[in-house]
Image (cartoon, rainbow, N blue to C red):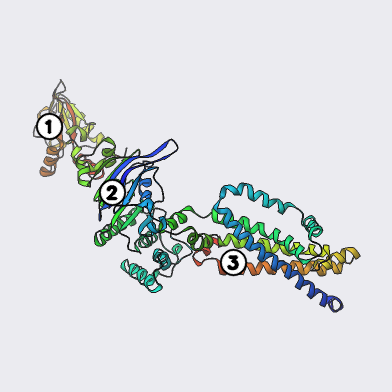
Amino acid sequence: MRTIMATYGHLLLKAIGVHMFYVTVSVVCGFFIGLIGGILLSRIPRASFVILPVVSVFQTIPGLAFIGILFLIIGMHPVTVLIALTVYAIFPVLKNTYEGILNIDPKYIEAARGCGMTSGQMLRMVQLPLASPEIVAGLRMAAVYTVSWAVLAAMIGLGGLGDFIYQGTASNNNTLILLGAVPAALLAIAIGAVIDLLQKKLTPKGMQEVVDR
Amino acid sequence: MIQFEHVSKSYGKNHILKNMNFTIPDGKFVVLIGKSGCGKTTTLKMINRLITPTSGRVLIDGQDISQMNPSDLRRHIGYVIQQIGLFPNMTIEQNVSVVPRLLKYDKDKCHKISENLLESIHMEKYKDKYPSELSGGQQQRIGVLRALAASPPVVLMDEPFGALDPMTRDELQIEIKNMQKRLNKTIVFVTHDMNEALRLADIIVFIDHGEIVQMDSPEEILRHPANRLVRDFLGKHVSEEQKPFKVEDFMLTKVKYVRSSRGVRECAEMMARNSIDSLLAVDDENRYIGTIKIGDMMHWGRNLETVEPLIRTDARTVQVGEEAKESFDYLLDTNADYVVVLNPDKSIAGIITKTSVARSVAENLWGGEES
């Protein structure tokens, strides 16, 4: 163990750093794009019958193929990885935001309109707070998936924990595979936990029992 | 003053409101009532533009509301809904001060307003709680405060107490009526409960199939219901319509009687079998003669062949078709056990006992069988 750490420790830390960079940037970008998209979509529920299936098509393209295609277009550049991961991170957030807003009990909407809120005020004061548990759930899903998809970055030689896994599979070295896979798994669990904590903090106090159920 | 001028609303071929014309004066408690789907809620929601008329105008204080900014209009009209709809992400204080905050009052003023309002219903200790921590009745009290927070002259209420238990509803009805008088608000209130309407309203607007059937004070509606539907809605409240009760409505018809030619033993056995202490006696043509008491039989019955000598004629008799009230009074005043009801041919129709009196009292109080 010690020898492994001595040999790969430095590389491992660097790989984790690169991996985290990919995940953080793409999840943050994906979250905001998904959030805004979901809000816009909730204004025109009819359009969602077209838009949601189209967006979900991206979800069905294997990550491997998608990164490969982007690689052909953009080349070997971190942007390729970031774009691919962002696209994957958008969908869960978009879908949950959209559904979270539409699933709000109409009585709150009627009360908000009756109070004289404009649609912007209603979004800020009522709809987003009430949809926040679902939105954060979407964020969690996006983040956890992105950790595993970021492994694919190594496929086009752009580092991250995938490096170890690819080298391991190529050289039939199980230690290397584990050296990539175990931190990636731990990273996913850690990020999930952080977002759970965030969810507890973000959920409006009066709605906590709703989330706990 | 709220005026409806030729207001109609239709969804496709479905006409919800047909040419509504009426005026709601300031400071009145107006109740819109009717069957579900009659258009009463639609009418209400036109006042704060949650629903727009297909044709016609709604004016508040002479101003056409379709020319006003809808959000601005709604901030100056209180609105309470049946589902309460307190925002679960806000504390009670924040809920109460929603409209003042939308109106951009400064923080201190918002705080003062909610504090005063909460104190007025003795709920200041709940200010930092969330709606889910309150009971339904408490929540709707806060719902009413939210509507009042910006001191709107007009408050709209859409079946606000419909989902509450009867006790809480009674309390809130009293509170809301007192509040309306004290603050001199114009309240437009939707309900399908005539009790509620009679209790609260200065003016009742009865709506059916999108048209006003009658618009009058509760007193006037009770006295002169415009049609059968209104009368049905009033139900037991229309006491003038009740016919006086007749004796046959309350008499017991399963009465034991014997021919006067019967033997004493036979009669005694009949009484024992039916656990009664007197029998009615009839002649051979079934005409009523009088009554036989168990006490008389014990005293003098031993040596008698028939019961004929024991028959007393002191029991009070009435004819079918007479008013029940006299018999009731007689029973209550004299402590007699029963009054005998006779058909025109003198045969026995039945008897009235104190149990009959009790039944009549019950029907008067609770409006008879629920059928």
Res. B358 in view: no
Residue with the most extreme front position: B67
Crowd tier of the residue under label 1, counting other residues whose Cα lies within 10 Å: few below 14, some 14–19, many 20 or above: some
Q: Quadrant of residue A6?
A: bottom right
Residue drawn at x 27%, y 48% as measured from the top left: B23
Residue A133 x/y as whole percent: 57, 62
Vertically, is B191 above or below A119? above
Image disc number at residue B242: none
| Residue found at x 79% / y 64% | A153
From the top left corner, tell me how far across and down residue A61 is, in percent.
Answer: 75, 52
Image mark for residue A199: 3
Question: In the figure, B41 relative to A10: above or below?
Answer: above
Residue B244 on image: x %, y % = 16, 36
Is residue A25 visible to us here?
yes
List x then y, in percent, for residue A51.
64, 50
Q: What chain does mark 1 sit on?
A: B
- Identified by mark 1, the residue type is Val
Name the residue beneath numbered marker 2.
B197
Which numbered disc covers residue B318?
1
Gap in Å between the C-alphas at discs 3 and 2?
47 Å
Question: How many other residues sit within 10 Å of disc 3, few (<14), some (14-19) or many (≥20)?
Answer: many
